[in-house]
Amino acid sequence: MKKYYLMAPGPTPIPPEVLQAIAQPIIHHRTPEYEALFGEVRAGLKALFQTKEEIIPFAASGSGAMEAAVVNTLSPGDKAIVIQAGKFGERWGGICKAYGIQQVVLEAPYGQTVPAERIEEALKKDPSIKAVFATHSETSTGVLHDIESYAKVTRNSQAILVVDAVSSLGVADLPMDAWGVDVVVAGSQKGLMLPPGLGLVAFNQRAWERSKSATLPKFYFNMATELKCVVKNQVNFTPAVSIVLGLKVALDIILKREGLQAVFKRHDRLARATRAGVEALGLTLFARARPSPAITAVEAPKGIDGEQVLRTFGKSHNITIAGGQGEMQGKVFRLGHMGYVGDFDVIVALSALELVLAELGVPADLGAGVRAAEKILAEVR
Amino acid sequence: MKKYYLMAPGPTPIPPEVLQAIAQPIIHHRTPEYEALFGEVRAGLKALFQTKEEIIPFAASGSGAMEAAVVNTLSPGDKAIVIQAGKFGERWGGICKAYGIQQVVLEAPYGQTVPAERIEEALKKDPSIKAVFATHSETSTGVLHDIESYAKVTRNSQAILVVDAVSSLGVADLPMDAWGVDVVVAGSQKGLMLPPGLGLVAFNQRAWERSKSATLPKFYFNMATELKCVVKNQVNFTPAVSIVLGLKVALDIILKREGLQAVFKRHDRLARATRAGVEALGLTLFARARPSPAITAVEAPKGIDGEQVLRTFGKSHNITIAGGQGEMQGKVFRLGHMGYVGDFDVIVALSALELVLAELGVPADLGAGVRAAEKILAEVR
């Protein structure tokens, strides 16, 4: 018997009380009961997104919600800046390509970030740019992009700022209204501690205004149609009812039981402990700047394939972590620590890492990673 | 204490063992465990769709899957026949409109069906027609369209036949390969006895061939990209893992425990009992032809608003049924009997209907509907 641990960057572990809510007998969505439930969820989502705007839910993964952000704000041939420093930045590029958007790609090497100055410069150079697509926590590299600075250079420009917050919502602070972010996109299976299948999109008034003239074709992901329903506590198409049942409980845990700021602090503390542990084992963090509190990407030890690390976590310890995506495959492995995660999840991850390194013949002091992490956990309360 | 009964045409009740499967701790989708699970689900779906082709799952509702069928088979400006005899036929029209498809609308009044001859004639008249969009069980009117005949007139034509089987898959027989249906679209929350949030699309080789030249824009709903993943027991984007966990159990119930043909017979028998009961109460079926085994639509009693029937089911008996959609609102009410439904669900529905009619002052013999239904249940084994 080997207990199973899910330590990948999404889907993330689900609290037992959320699982129980999801396993309730299904309710019908065109009923007063569902409308009352959804009314509470609506209010909770606004608090979570830190906005006064409505959040539109789609029965879809985060990538579907990203598509909604594109097709509701742009028209064929429009020009947009796409910030690319990882696989999820490249996903914005893929969606823009599919819909015939002209792209101004601002790249940084994997593990690094794009400074706001480059966006400012590009926007000044080309006043026809309509949108800037960015990623808050880039899950593929473990880097947190500086959305606050991005918003400073976009909010007085002609372009709206569209942020993929799929793996940062409820993990890292992203005050949508206070920073002036125009569009925030999220998903259910990361910080929200739910199964995948619910995508969330928030537009501010500037984005809603833009949506009126956006002519890219859309049907399932039509934000304006959904908004008309949401304000009546409804949705246009059959919603992911079971996930919405779980969402009510997850929002209560985040907002009422722990508190949003405490949730951010917990993630920051656990991420710092993880990084300290990894470095104490002589390994190198893949993030060169601004490591994300959602995930720690680690360079594979010299002479070892990162996929071998991943497989050994699975085979020897029944722990799911993540490998590298695309060109990063084999070069990195990734430890997720978002959502329903506490001190001893970090300890288990580092202990397992020590045992994995030993099994693979990588020199590392057993216990050194755990000790370094405990130091952070003891210091930061 | 009033026990709750869900008797609407989707979402439908979920078997307890499926709910339990859904409430399992989540597993990660990039693991051998998920791939093994999905491998079994893939095989089960082929049996359910009665096809040798792959079934592509999307984290989306049935409407999202319908959109996938459109954007992967057509190009801007293409012409298509849209069969419209209810709200779901009109949904095909809505999707075609959003994507700039020229529509040849073949209509029938609500409650009726469009004969195959009209399709044949339209196809002969205009050889540029690329597709025929039809609805198997039209949930808004309770009519089952004759897809077998539609396939006879399309399979040797230039047009592919695309069928919305959202509320008929696992309810009414639809042998995709045997009939020569090119595209079948379904959802999780009807005959499959699952929560909403999983859309399913099957293409035959003719549809896959067509998809190669279809230039409508798509990203999330790209069938070709998904196919490459599905054959490796994977998906492109994060799947609705919890529903897939439930799907494995639901497929076992349908295919192994009961058997697909027995499932069809059960639905037919329950639908016949329901219709007999409704008519014995002096009410009129809304379906003028080919009533669906998934749902029974009933005309509101004279002088009574159908919405009042719906509300009385809810308020007095804690039973959710459905009202009329669009122009049918107030004129019909609808009793669902698909999925996890047995003899005594029909009896409860009819008993409640008798009590509701009594409460609303509609003359009807108490017990007459139940008696008529029992007669069918006793005769048809």
Image: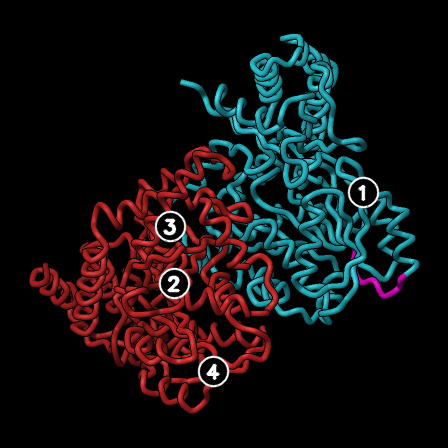
Chain colours: A cyan, B red
Secondary structure under badge 4?
strand
> Do the CB atoms of the residues marked 2 and 4 lie less than 8 Å apart?
no
Position of B120 with respect to B344 (left or right) is right
Mark 3 on the same chain as mark 4:
yes
Tag 1, which chain? A
Which quarter of the picture shows residue A157?
A: bottom right
How many neighbours does mark 1 have within 10 angstroms: few (below 14), some (14-19), or many (20 or more)? some
Q: Are marks 3 and 4 in contact (CB under 8 Å)?
A: no
* Disc 3: CA contacts within 10 A as few (<14), some (14-19) or many (>=20): many
> Which label number is shown at residue B129?
4
Q: CA distance from mark 1 to mark 2?
A: 45 Å
Where does the magenta region start and end? A126-132
Q: Earlier in the sequence, mark 2 or mark 4?
A: 4
Q: Nearer the viewer, mark 2 or mark 4?
A: 4
Q: Which label belongs to residue A108?
A: 1
Examine the rendered structure and indicate whether residue A331 appears above or below residue B259: above
- Residue drawn at the location 51% of the way across and 53% of the way down: B226
Are both tags, 1 and 3, on one chain?
no
Name the residue carrying label 2. Answer: B166
The percent position of residue A90, horizontal first and vertical second, equals 70, 49
Three-letter amino acid code at the position of disc 1: Ala
User: Label for residue B357?
Assistant: none
Check disc 3 and report the residue beneath it.
B194
Seen in the image, is A171 located left or right of residue A1?
right
The vertical placement of A258 against A243, above or below, is above
Give the mark, 3 or 4, whose residue is nearer the N terminus: 4
